[in-house]
Amino acid sequence: MSVMEIFETMEYGPAPESSSLALAWIKEHEPFQLFINNQWVKPDQGNYFESNNPANGKTLTKVASADKADVDTAVAAARQAFKSWSKTPGHVRARYLYAIARHIQKHSRLLAVLEALDNGKTIRETRDLDIPLVARHFYSHAGWAQLMESELPDYQAVGVVGQIIPWNFPLLMMAWKIAPAIAMGNTVVLKPARYTSLTALKFAEILQEVGLPAGVVNIVTGEASKAGDALVNHPDIDKIAFTGSTDVGRSIRKSTAGSGKKLSLELGGKSPFIVFDDADLDSVVEGVVDAIWFNQGQVCCAGSRLLVQENIAERLINKLRARMENLRIGDPLDKTMDIGAIVSPGQRAEIQQLVDIGVKEGAQLWQPSTACPTDGSFFPPTLFTNVAPASTLAQVEIFGPVLVTLTFRTPSEAVEIANNTRYGLAASIWSDNINLALDIAPKLKAGSVWVNSTNLFDAACGFGGYKESGYGREGGKEGLYEYVKPAWLARSQPKNATAPAVVADQDADEGTGNGVVHTDALEALTTEDQSSLPSIDRTPKLFIGGKQVRPDSGYSLTITAGNGRIIGEVGEGNRKDIRNAVEAAHKASSWAGATTHNRAQILYYIAENLAVREAEFARRIVEQTGREYADALGEVQTSLSRLFSYAAWADKYEGSVHRPPMRGVVLAMKEAIGVVGIACPDEYPLLGFISLVAPAIAMGNSVVVVPSTQAPLSATDCYQIFETSDLPAGVVNIVTGNREELSKVLAEHHDVNAMWYFGTAEGSKTVELASTSNMKRTWVNYGRSRNWLHRPQGEGQEFLREATQIKNIWVPYGE
Ligand code: NDP
């Protein structure tokens, strides 16, 4: 093409990035081995798989395929390294992380080219986004390693962490996993995705250069069914961190249920991109390009659902089509390309299949007339209009460059459609009215909300999902808690997964308590408590929607004291009662919007009303447990103090404002999770109940509580206290009955957003298994008791963290 022709057509000339250095590096290392204990190790069975270049379908190299024996070796190396790495001073760990960041920058061009070759993403993106963010993540976490001692003084490393990452951002996802893990003193065994192992292996070489102690990071390449499965099920792994599809996340939750392994899941999404009629449409068009055509749409938080206010829909769609005609799709190593290749022919075929379903379901497909390469896995940018909100296209994660368009009329309709998905990873809001944008942001069920922007990430800002997009955060201080455990908890896994709950805290692991059982204490009660008249029969019902209601079953359960004496009856709740309670809890959702001052006042009021009946509550504890009166009174007084603590925290457990490297701010808001199911421990009938309910409601959740089966009367005695303390109806619902059965129903319920369970090891496993129905967050005790009287174990930020989820709202500013 002559200069004149270029001038007239304004066509781009080719601007290829050379792949020669990257190809030479690949050749030098072929076949790639496993990275264990800082050595390159041949796979046990001598198996290798091919790694291909998606842009031309050619084989790039061969990579070792690890099996169970290799994973065993890697985990043993990590376990050995943990002994010293977890004790290495924070400053020393910081020096290593800093060195890793520096070396990533030194090798940035090689890493960028390798990533483009292996994944098919454009060099423009790997060079300008992936690799700089990787370096930034290690720099930022070098800081957290340095500050761990002062900023997380009551926490320690979890242990050996198994990490499994996807292929869409291979090096970046690896950084998001490894940096916080090793910063907090853990050691790691990481499995990259089968399609994209190469940059992780280059990273391993960087670790050798840096001299990271052997075994701190081990990389086992391989397939899901072998290496992945072995890692998930390995008995000596303390935590699994996973990013990938919701289906695989669900199967990992099932495999690890009851094992005590800590789990964080970053799963799929179907994120809304909401455009109001006052938005700057030219900016919106560029935003859409970034939202859905960035990385070929293979982004978990891709803005794949365009929600447009009806009166501007046609204008925006026309502008979008014009822009799509100018998108350039082709060789990922050409710096002028906007869109590269899909990671594999299989993934491409899946996108095509979903597109075909969309057409069959009546949606209207539009693709630009520009040529799309036919050799290699390319898929043209695609726009669908006339899409029904419940159709496959609007609900299923396509994970490709496919945008579906829906319209809305009012802001509340926009929120409704935006939230009408099982996912909750991210959302974008476009409007020139900041008041409107900041009114909508808290209403969206999503972990990240971008105002007039999209797909922004930074190490200082947490990232992660609501609903079936998973739980746990990566980045920010909140991300660190995924890699630590409270210092008082000596082991992250229970000693004996099948051991039943103990009544008091005799477990040396978890500290000491004074819940000693005295079965003869009842007889020791003073005469003032002994009446010769039969007491007036009072069988507590259930407490649902602010009312005392009869159980659906019409049955009651007899409650006996430690010495076998009958002390009362409670209603026997069933599945239907739980359903009613969950419905009542949802109706009370405006509690989340009550001011923190108001919530605090109500908690103080509850404490005030409990204080008036202190002696009566203490006697009830004596009746149920046979403990000494003074001991029981201590439990009531600690419960009062606990109510005061959470009244205090209600307006003090606040979010933060981050300053990522851009003009703007990120508001990290701590939000209520929604409806929380709570199963109470048997020890400390009142304190166990209050210690769980108070933080949950202080943070704006509504709860459905199942008290201890054997000692429920302290909870049912609270009905009147709640009724007289201005607590809105439905915020606290109590269903008595068989804790194990009712917990399972709660954990299975689709409208319960989190489940806390403090009972047996078996019950913990049941709850974790049942939680996969809607991938709700769980918090269980694996049959271990806790010393509820001891403040570090019985109250504080651990409880508040479990009661909240963080939403990061990105607000850029400037003209
Ligand atoms: P997967 O969730 O299947 O894979 C992610 C990672 O998990 C890979 O390393 C994979 O290994 C591994 N893995 C898969 N199954 C298991 C298992 N049972 N036990 C342990 N490890 C396992 O994603 P895919 O790559 O198959 O993509 C499928 C769909 O998932 C996409 O179309 C997309 O919708 C979604 N996805 C979502 C992502 C996100 O970030 N939210 C990222 C990637 C995909 P291997 O590579 O060997 O299969």
Image (cartoon, rainbow, N blue to C red):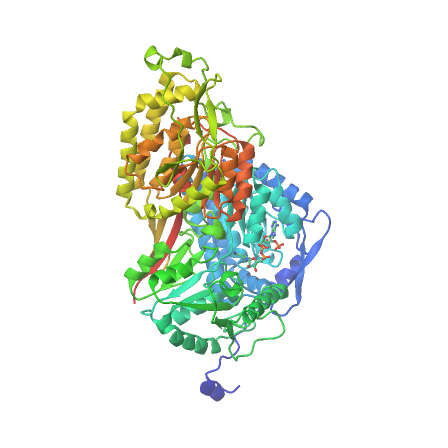
Residue 55 in the image: above or below residue 91: below
> How far across and down, in percent of the image, does residue 455 sit?
43, 61
- Looking at the rendered structure, the number of numbered marks drawn on it comes to 0
**Residue 116 falls in image quadrant:** bottom right
Name the residue at 36% across, 28% down.
717
Is 644 displayed left or right of 475 in the figure?
A: left
Residue 341 in the image: above or below residue 562: below
Dividing the image into 4 quarters, which one contains the C terminus?
A: bottom left
Q: Quadrant of ligand 1?
A: bottom right
**Residue 28 falls in image quadrant:** bottom right
Name the residue at 73% across, 51% down.
46
Residue 15 in the image: above or below residue 672: below
> How far across and down, in percent of the image, does residue 10 sit?
45, 83
> How far across and down, in percent of the image, does residue 500 sit?
55, 28
> How far across and down, in percent of the image, does residue 174 sit?
53, 52
Is 65 displayed left or right of 338 in the figure?
A: right
Is 577 displayed left or right of 347 in the figure?
A: left
Observer-nearest residue: 334 or 323? 323
Observer-nearest residue: 546 or 682? 546
Residue 498 in the image: above or below residue 404: above
Q: Is residue 37 visible?
A: no
Q: Is residue 64 visible?
A: yes
